[in-house]
Image (tube, helix red, strand yellow):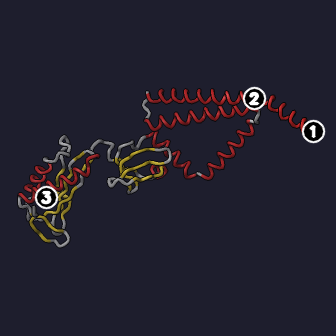
Amino acid sequence: MPNLEKYLQNILDNIIAYTPKLAGAIAILLIGFWVANKLERVVVERLKRSQLSPEITSFIGSMFGITLKIAVLLVAAGIAGFDTSALVGMLAAAGFAVGLALQGGLANFASGILILIFKPYKVSDWIDLDGKFGKVEEIQIFNTILTTPGLKTLIIPNGQVTSNIVTNYSKKGILRLELMINMPYEESFPKVKAIIEKAIEQSVYIKKQYEPLVGIEVFDAHYIQIGVKPYVNPDEYWEAFYEINALLKKAFSENNIQVAYPDTVMIGKIGD
């Protein structure tokens, strides 16, 4: 019994000794986290007034908040009686181990920062990255999310962005269609060109302030290739593509224009 009483007394003494420290640590955590959240919101609001993009604003705000909260945790641990130097050493060792395990992830992280700073593209831009074409839906720290015209979602690591050529179709706000038509040598090119120009003017999608290009691209052995290149809104690329092709077919049919079939090198009329 004396040993039990001594044991209970030690427990009581420890509770009395550590309760103020524990209460202080909890108070520091509650107050510190509240202050950290407030400061994070203040920083984000200040950044929103600058010229930084929403993506980098959110990232900087999050990193600032995380840094403050780690500092609060260390202070609270020190008040509770833990050896903070040992905790810092453990965090550093853990960070080093994680860094070695996630070298590719860290490369994507660094690339994400570069994308947010230099802005080779932004959300809603149409881009082509190493043969992957789509609309930018989201720029994350590790990945860029694209949506293809077929509504497929592409998740591309940011490291591939900074190590490959990126084609941004939306940077200028306009995009040129690249259409090719095979015409026999018997047809009059000035006549065909006038018909093409009149046909594409009927499209509601072309940018009429930019003159479309129509010209001979290739002199083939059996026919000539005519390039038709009007300018359209990048977001309306496919609508314009299909409508202009339909308008050209209709115009050729109405004007009895012949075309060359490349597979058989035959010349024939175009139906309705």
- Numbered marks: total: 3
**Viewport quadrant of the C terminus:** bottom left
Q: CA distance from mark 1 to mark 2?
A: 31 Å
Q: Extreme front residue here? A: 1
**Label placed on residue 1:** 1
Amino acid marked by disc 2: Lys
Alpha-carbon neighbours of circle 2 within 10 Å: few (<14), some, or many (≥20)?
Answer: some
Residues at circles 3 and 2 in contact by the CB criterion of under 8 Å: no
Residue 130 in the image: state x and y as whole percent.
Answer: 40, 56
Q: Taking 99 as reference, is 127 left or right?
A: left
- Residue 263 lies, with reference to residue 158, above or below; the image says below
Residue 18's quadrant in the figure?
top right
Q: Is residue 127 left or right of residue 230?
A: right
Q: Residue at x 80, y 28 (%)?
A: 16
Mark 3 or mark 1: whose residue is earlier in sequence: 1
Q: Which residue is mark 3?
A: 249
Q: Of circles 1 and 2, which is in front?
A: 1
How far across and how far down the image is residue 243, in percent? Answer: 18, 52
Q: Secondary structure at mark 2?
A: helix
Q: CA distance from mark 3 to mark 1?
A: 104 Å
Work out whether mark 3 precedes mark 2 in sequence or the reverse, and give the earlier one. 2
Q: Nearer the viewer, mark 3 or mark 2?
A: 2
